[in-house]
Image (cartoon, helix red, strand yellow):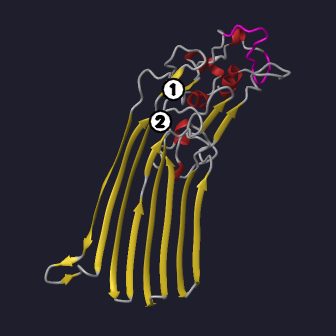
Amino acid sequence: FFSAKAVPLKRNQFGYTLTGPIRLPKIYDGRDKTFFLYSHEWTRQRNAISSTALVPTAAERAGDFSFVQQAGFAIVDPVTKQPFPNHIIPRDRISRIGTALINLYPAPNSPDPTRNYVGTPRRLLNNGIPTVRIDHQLTPRDSLFGRFTMNSPFERSPGQAFTQSFPGFDSVQDDSNLQASIGLTHTFSPAVINETLIGFVRFRRDRVSQDSGSRNWVQELGIRGFSPDPMAWGAPSVTPAGYPEVGFSTNNAVLQWITQSEQVSDNLSIIRTKHALKAGFSLQSKRLTQFQLSNPNSAYGFSGMFSAPPPVTTTTRFHSIADLL
């Protein structure tokens, strides 16, 4: 509703399927016993996500709260607890890192004082799903099939997953999923059939920020005391009370997950007049490898308690910005 224009949505799904007998001229003719199926499907999506938010104004970023006309309001020196004159923080008391953190917020672009920013950050989704299957009649009593499928979605989306979304802090997620199976069916008689199956599944997910390996925000901002892994590079999460989160969100951990499973099963079916008997077994092996970093570039929250006059019983969003500065 608050967007200046309709946000874009482009979604295309397309693909094809080929199937038939396998024939190699002068080499192999499988018209009666060997068949293939190959399909490939793609998804391409580009869309924007509209959201509104309250972001600090130019005056607030400069430590100037003289515009606040509220009984009892004061911005105090966190050390002496004495009010700053006219609610203005002196320039020599403003932290360079604090200024850098508050400038992670985009500038206001709306006159509405309660939601002075309207954003439409973009989302990108690509996916491709190739599948191949071969069926072969070994003998009149034995049939064999094999199937392989790959699913590899790639998504880049705003990094504030559950709050208002700001551009520049995207989460990048890349999946690679494999499935393969082989099955052999043997017919002992019209009433006795055995089926053997072998299956394999592997799922891999990598999630990083858009700046992974390319921009060390912690070093750039001058934050000292730790050095995040290049894989985890991204803007720190910043949340002054009364404002939405900015930076690479705490909801988006940097991670790598790999799960893998192998399975062997056998099923024997026997029909005797009015009775059906089934027996078999299943063996499974499952493995999980997980590497995950939560808030690797740090997460900062500011309540306003240090810039509010004592005794602190209540704070405003202006005090939280003052604490940040």
Q: Residue at x 35, y 53 (%)?
A: 42
Front one among 149 and 183: 183
Front one among 252 and 219: 252
Q: Residue at x 41, y 37 (%)?
A: 47
> Do the residues bearing badges 1 and 2 touch, measured as CB atoms within 8 Å?
yes
Q: Quadrant of residue 33?
A: bottom left
Query: Magenta: predominant secondary structure element?
Result: loop
Q: Which residue is mark 2?
A: 168
Q: Position of residue 167 (x, y in %)?
A: 48, 33
SS assignment at label 2: loop
Q: Position of residue 38 (x, y in %)?
A: 31, 66
Q: Which residue is mark 1?
A: 106
Q: Earlier in the sequence, mark 1 or mark 2?
A: 1
Image quadrant occupied by the C terminus? top right
Q: Position of residue 85 (x, y in %)?
A: 71, 10
Front one among 12 and 190: 190
Amino acid type, callout 1:
Pro
Q: Quadrant of residue 40?
A: bottom left
240 part of magenta stretch:
no
Front one among 55 and 11: 11
Crowd tier of the residue under label 2, counting other residues whose Cα lies within 10 Å: few below 14, some 14–19, many 20 or above: many
Crowd tier of the residue under label 1, counting other residues whose Cα lies within 10 Å: few below 14, some 14–19, many 20 or above: some
Decide if residue 2 is on the left or right side of residue 93.
Answer: left
Q: Compute the Cα span from label 1 to label 2.
A: 10 Å
What residue span does the magenta drawing correspond to? 68-82
Decide if residue 236 is on the left or right side of residue 154.
Answer: right
Is 30 rendered above or below residue 149? Answer: below
